[in-house]
Amino acid sequence: MGKAEDSGVEERPQWDNKVQYLLTCIGFAVGIGNVWRFPYLCQIYGGGAFLIPYLIALVFEGLPLLYLELAIGQRFRMGSIGVWNSISPLLGGVGIASMLVSLLVCMFYNTLLAWVLWYLFHSFQNPLPWSQCPLNDNLTGYNTECVKSTPANYFWYRETLNITPDIETSGSLHWWLVICLASAWCVVYVCFIKGIESMGKVVYVTAIFPYLVLTIFLIRALTLPGATVGLVYLFTPDWEILKNPQVWLDAATQIFFSLSVAFGGLIAFSSYNPERNNCEMDAILVGVINSATSLYGAIPIFSILGFKANTAYNSCVKENILALTNHFEFSDQNITAENYDHWLEYLNRTSPGEVAGVDLRLCDLQTFLDQSASGTGLAFIVFSEAVVSMPGAQIWAILFFTMLFSLGLSSMFGNLEGVLAPIKDLKLVPTWIPDGLVAAVICLIAFLMALIFTMGSGNYWVEIFNSYVGSVPLLIVAFFEIIAVIYIYGMKNFSEDIYFMTGKKPNIFWKACWMVISPLMLLVVLITYVVVQAQKHPTYPTWNPAYELFPKTEVKPYPDWVFAIIILLSVIPVLPIPLVALYQLICCRMKKSSAHTDLSPSCNDGFEVETQQQTNQRA
């Protein structure tokens, strides 16, 4: 493969054009995590200061791995298993590991889309169902659980998830979530029914639409009162936080998972390219757009969160003004929001005893801003609460959840392709069976396995899959990928392949990253991550109305049997790497042993071969 000649691999489908390919890669890389994970990390890790380790990880870890996957897939023109088997049969397990991780991620990731669909369906109601508490069973007042928490919390935990108090209480399947999950899988299948031919058409919408919505949100969010407060809070750098090693670990893992490397999907997508294509420019373009999208999405998100904090602060001040006015029998409009601080200081100085007797809330804007959230908490609770306060709430809710669905759908394309392409490589299915039927069977299997997420304890299992399936296994797969290409296939062969595809050999930066910097960073991140996780027994937050500090979540340790499942989820996907290598070594040893046995004194095969060779030489 290192020589500048066609690879000779059987004909593969091809993209209609370069734009279609780039949009598919960008759609796969840019997912829901760009909207609800990156802003959260910026918020808790010193605002603008977090961008420093993030960009360092992008340049020295993310882009080199992305470039390597796009190049190796384009040159070998195979899926992940085919690529690693071609380099060495011992490495076939790397492709199987990628396939298993992609399958497990497909299961829980499409559950997120099911939740998004549930919220999207309810966004057409007026008023929004999470804007007010429902009545209790006796119709004599509002629901107690809702009153103790908030309408948004109640709609998420009770109306949507109907969540159990802990993971050991499974609950039953919730029919509304089963329907949403089935709908999400049907949408994915319809988009995949003709492979890249149909997926390539859909991606024009799923990859471009989120940017349109983000731009609309950006324009609207910047005009909201309190938007600047959120932006200042987001981007004010705290340089001291960079001394915390956890910041660097989270930055490295965020850029790694954000680019969607090691899933096998990018290798499959690039294998549909013509062999002569500038994959270096593709990698840089996809990587930079992915990171720029994270930053671009953080601006409207935190403008709206600033608006929410400002609204909560003003509401708090108004309640205190009313309490002070009634207690001291002031005339209306005597104490206003503008002179509230002055009045409070004056009353504390002149009548401290009476002020202490008034039930005043602590109104601090910083406290409201510090109420950080990520993942489902940001999308389904914090953001949905903020949308309620915006004029035209239904329109903004519809736009927001449609955007999340588009982001998730385009990422699902890459996850599912990371499963389907290796199945073709392994030739597990006869060629006469259409690809659409294979995709249907895989979607059905994943749907049935994902029914666990529609139970009362489903949210807890989603958090487990999200935290452990896509962490250690992907880091291990990526480490073996880079070792396989650079040290087994060989830097020289790989450089010649890149020269054949792009017309120029990789520069010293790429070589240094591939040979030393990137594998070293991956190894450090992997070891550090495992050490950090091993130092504590994993815990999880539960929603328990009987908890004495409710509506705060009750943090509980995982039961031992769940902890065992967590270990299995982290280990099983990567087991094929050593098992396949061991199997190939045993087969190789058995073949050598069999060949040695066949050379008996009465056998003249060796003489015949030697004679034939001598004849050829004379000729």
Image: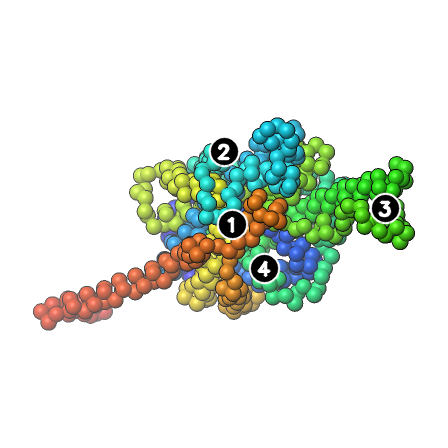
Q: Are marks 1 and 3 in contact (CB under 8 Å)?
A: no
Secondary structure at badge 4 equals helix
Inter-mark Cα distance, 4 to 2: 35 Å
Q: Is residue 44 left or right of residue 528?
A: right
Mark 2 or mark 3, which is nearer the start of the sequence?
2
Work out whether mark 4 precedes mark 3 in sequence or the reverse, and give the earlier one: 4
Counting from the top left corner in percent of width and height, residue 476 is at: 46, 61
Report, in whole angstroms, how far the alpha carbon at label 1 lies from the one at label 3.
43 Å
In the image, residue 177 sits, relative to residue 562, either above or below, namely above
**Residue at the spot 66% in from the left edge and 35% down from the top edge:** 131
Please name whichever residue, 157 or 576, is drawn nearer the observer in this view of the structure. 157
- Of the image marks 1 and 3, the number of the one nearer the N terminus: 3
Q: Which residue is mark 2?
A: 176
Precedes in sequence: disc 1 or disc 2: 2
Q: Position of residue 195 (x, y in %)?
A: 44, 40
Q: Which mark is residue 463?
A: 1
Q: Are marks 1 and 4 in contact (CB under 8 Å)?
A: no
Cα–Cα gap, marks 4 and 3: 41 Å
Q: Nearer the viewer, residue 438 or 499?
A: 438
Can residue 600 be seen by looking at this rendering? Answer: yes
The CA span between labels 3 and 2 is 48 Å
As drawn, the label of residue 340 is 3
Mark closer to the chain start, 1 or 4: 4
Mark 2 closeness class: few <14, some 14–19, many ≥20 residues within 10 Å: some
Q: Amino acid at mark 2?
A: Trp
Task: Please name the residue that numbered disc 4 is placed on.
Answer: 250
The image quadrant where one finds the C terminus is bottom left
Question: Which residue is located at x 63 percent, y 66 percent?
Answer: 244
Furthest residue in direction bottom, as rendered: 601
